[in-house]
Amino acid sequence: MKDTKWGIVYCPKSGSFRPQKRWEKIEKILKQYNVDYDFVQSEQSSSVDRLVTMLINNGYKTIVIVGGDSALNDAVNCLMMADKPTREGIKLGVIPNGKMNDFAHFWGIKENDIEGTVGMLKKGRTRKIDLGCIHYANSNGEKCHRYFHNSLNIGLVASVMNMRRKTTGWMGVNTVSIIPASLKMVFQRLEYKMHLKINDDTIKRKIMSVSIGNAQGYGFTPNAVPYNGWLDVSVVYHPEVTQLFEGFYLLYSGKILNHRDVHPYRTKAVEVLKAERASIGIDGRLMNTPVGPFRIEVEQEVVSFIIP
């Protein structure tokens, strides 16, 4: 396998009209840039793991995901299963093509700029990025873990992100599709009994949501960056209805930390001793709720990511 050959995993956006047309545009630009690549297509989200693992085992040194945050999450978890020498020899890149592309947006990579993205990937400039990791036990009592590159959410924001994924397909535009998801926060003002330990603080009370960001976290951890060895945490208490509308404005303007019911932290680890019935979302996709306490940590500079 030539070191310059790319392995590309194309993940069609579910619910989109004529998804192959998107790939045809990408393919045309790849040929313009004389990119040497092999291409595989994921027919469903569960196949991304298998395809990325196949590319790793076949010696590809540049792996590009044409997909969104969830597909990228599968890719980084596959990379973290490889031994360290293998992982350190691989560059990971993304061409945004998902319902949520928050991590790509963090780096200024845009969905409608395919030519600029391919040109950036061709240059191959990389940066070692951090990953967050949740350590938990499943229903069988087995110890498990999963990595995230963008954010992990507990509580209402996890449900909102899941609804956003479902509404984007028929609403079409992310900025529009998040509106019905956000309104859920008004009409379904849930709160959960939680017991958290963050740095020297112990929080034991009813909480609406917790966002733990390795990066911007869909606006809930706007100051987080995936290369400083820290996790940003936003703990959201139960605001009044009038304050919720203020919160929407601050969220969409990138100033959510200015809301009086949002309590920010910066930490290396978060211990969740209790989170009754709260959904957990990892990089925008719901995961099976861990049984009992769990811990979220940061692992510093573990994946080489291609950046502008």
Image (cartoon, rainbow, N blue to C red):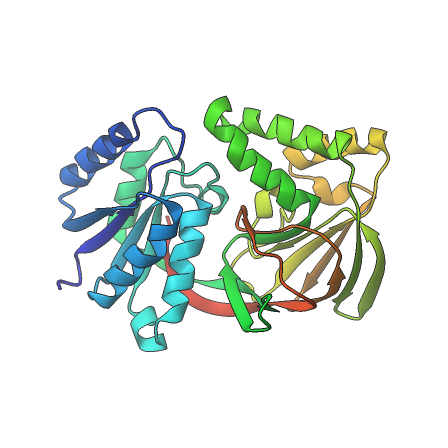
Up the image or down, 300 lies above or below 249; here it is below
Q: Could you say which quadrant of the image residue 4 lies in?
A: bottom left
**Residue 163 in sight in this render:** yes
Using the image as rendered, state which of residue 3 and residue 167 is in the foreground.
167
Q: What residue appears at the point 82 percent right and 44 percent down from the top-left corner?
A: 261
Up the image or down, 230 lies above or below 171; here it is below
Q: Could you say which quadrant of the image residue 143 lies in?
A: bottom right
Using the image as rendered, state which of residue 79 and residue 139 is in the foreground.
139
Query: Where residue 162 sits in the image (x, y, percent)?
Result: 57, 40
Q: Could you say which quadrant of the image residue 294 lies in?
A: bottom right
In the rendered structure, the answer to whether residue 37 lies left or right of residue 157 reads left
**Residue 172 in sight in this render:** no
Using the image as rendered, state which of residue 32 and residue 143 is in the foreground.
143
In the rendered structure, the answer to whether residue 147 lies left or right of residue 33 reads right
Query: Where residue 270 sits in the image (x, y, percent)?
Result: 68, 66
Number of labelled discs? Answer: 0
Query: Where residue 213 sits in the image (x, y, percent)?
Result: 60, 54
Identify the residue at the far front of this view: 140
In the rendered structure, the answer to whether residue 253 lies left or right of residue 79 reads right
Q: What residue appears at the point 35 percent right and 76 percent down from the top-left corner?
A: 83
Q: What residue appears at the point 37 percent right and 38 percent down from the top-left corner?
A: 97
Q: What residue appears at the point 27 percent right and 35 percent down from the top-left corner?
A: 115
